Image (cartoon, grey):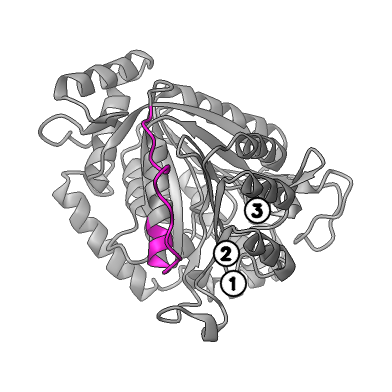
Amino acid sequence: MQRGVRARRHPCLVVLHAALASVLAACAVPNVNGAIAQAPPGPQTVVGAHGPLSAARSREILDALNRQSPNSDILDRHIAIEEAVTGTPLIAGNRTTILHDGGATFTAMFDAIRGARHSINLEFYTFEDVESGGEHLGTLLLAKRQQGVAVNILYDSYGSADTPPEFLKSLRAAGCLVLEYNPIDPLRARGPYLPNDRDHRKLLIVDGLMAFVGGVNLYTGYQAHPHSELIGSGGDTNVFWHDTDMQIGGPAVAALQQLFVQHWIDQDGPPLDQSTFFPPLQHQGNEVLHVLGSTPGQPVPAYYATILSAITNAEQRIWLTTAYFVPTDDELDDLESAARRGVDVRLMLPSQSDSQAAFDVGRSHYDDLLEAGVKIYEIQNEVLHSKTAVIDGVWSVIGSSNFDHRSVLFNDEVDVIVLGRATATQLEAEFQADEAKSRAIDATTWSHRSFEERLRELFARIWQSML
C-alpha cells in the first residue's frame, strides 16, 4: 500500500533505530511482526527495600501480580519483555497514587514539602512560584529552609526562561542550592554548549521517602480555571491545562533519588549533602515499578526502547495519551501495525496546543493512522499535557516523555513503568473519562478538511525532527 507523505528520517533516528534493533535482538524481543516475545532464560530481576530478592521471592511477587489479573499470561510476557529490554531490575513493594491535573498535584506536593524533615529535591523543566491553597511555593520552601531542611533545585534554562530572576535569587539568598541546567546563555555554560539538549524532567523527592513524577510542571498556567485566560493558548477562554502525575512511596524512590543526584553531578552542581538522601525504605504497597531515566547520551534512550517493545508486543489494546504527537517513523509504523493485527489502538490527543507546529505535525499523520484502524480522539476545551500509556490492561507508564522526536533525540526524561492491573485500571478509567469530553475523528470528515489545514500540516513536517 502506498503510504501518505512521510518526512525523511532524521539521521540520528536512523542510528537510534539500528541500535534499538541490536538491543532487542540481544534480548530475544521480536521485531515488528507482533509475535509474542519469549522470556529470557532465568528469573526476572526484582529488587525490594533491602536490595535484590531471591529467585523464589521474585517469583512469589510476580505470581501474586498474575493472580490480580485475569490475563496473567499477558502480564507475565510484559514483565519478561520489560526487564529484558533495558536490563535494569524491576522494583517491588511500592505504593502509587494517580494525581489528576495541576490542582491535585500541587496540593499533594505542598503537603509533602510541609512534612519534610531533611531534604527537598526538585528537578523541573518549568520552575515557577506556583500557588496552592493560598500559599506560594517560594514561601513554603523558604520556611522549610529556615527550619534546616536542605532545598536543592535543578531547573531547565529554557523551560524556566520566564521565571523571574528575583524569585531564584531569593531562594539562593536563603541557602537553597539552585542549579540551572544547560544555560541558554553561552557565557554561563559549564561545559560544551548544548542549547538543544534540555532537562524535560518533572521530579520531586522529599526526604528520600516520597517522590512525584509525571507531566505536571511547577507552572502557573495550571492555576488557570475554566473562566480565565490560558497562558500559552493564544488567549482562548473556558479552557485549562489537563495533566497527570503520580505519587510514589517505597523502594522505587531510591532509584528516582539516584537519577536526581547523577543529573546534579553531571551539571557540575555544588556538593550535595547526601547523608539523608537514601534512608531505609520499607514496602508500602504491591506495585512493581521500573524507573527509567533517559538521556540523549544513551545508545538508545531507555523510554524509547521500552515503549516500542511494549507496542510491538501488545496483544489486546494500546491506549496512548500524549500532549505532543510528533511520532518517529518507527513509532508510527508500530502503532499502525498493531491496529492492523487487531489491537485496539486509541490515541488521546489535543484539539489545541501551546505548540502549533507540533499540533500540525500530529494531525498530518491522521490519514494513515485512520486507514490502519487507529481510533483518534481530540480532547475539547482543554490543553492536554498528559504523557501516559496503558497496554493490555497490565502495562502502564507515567512520566515526562512525549510521543515526539525531542523526547528521543534531545531531552533528559524520567518515566515510571507500572506492571500490574491496579494502576492500569485507573488510567484506563481516566482515558474513558477523557473520551467523554473528546471529539472522535472520523475518516470521512477528516478527508474533507481545508486546503489551508493540509498546507499547514505539510509545512510543519519540515521541522518535525526538532519538535
Drawn side of residue 331 relative to residue 162, left or right: left
Q: Does residue 3 appear in the picture of this structure? A: no
- Asked whether the residues under the numbered discs 3 and 2 touch, taking CB atoms below 8 Å apart as contact, a structural biologist would say no
Magenta-span inclusion, residue 131: no
Disc 3 vs disc 2: which is toward the camera?
2
Sequence-wise, the earlier of marks 1 and 2 is 2
User: What is the span of residues highlighted in magenta in the rendered image?
Assistant: 262-281
* Picture residue at 88% right of the left edge, 50% below the top: 228
Q: x, y (%) of residue 80?
A: 23, 34
Please, what is the three-letter code of the amino acid marked with disc 1?
Ala
Q: Which residue is mark 1?
A: 460
Residue 454, by quadrant, is bottom right
Drawn side of residue 462 relative to residue 448, left or right: left
Q: Quick one: SS at disc 2?
A: helix
Q: Quick one: SS at disc 3?
A: helix
Closest to the observer, 401 or 271: 271
Please, what is the three-letter code of the amino acid marked with disc 2?
Val
Please, what is the three-letter code of the amino acid marked with disc 3?
Trp
- Asked whether the residues under the numbered discs 1 and 2 touch, taking CB atoms below 8 Å apart as contact, a structural biologist would say yes
Q: Which residue is mark 3?
A: 446
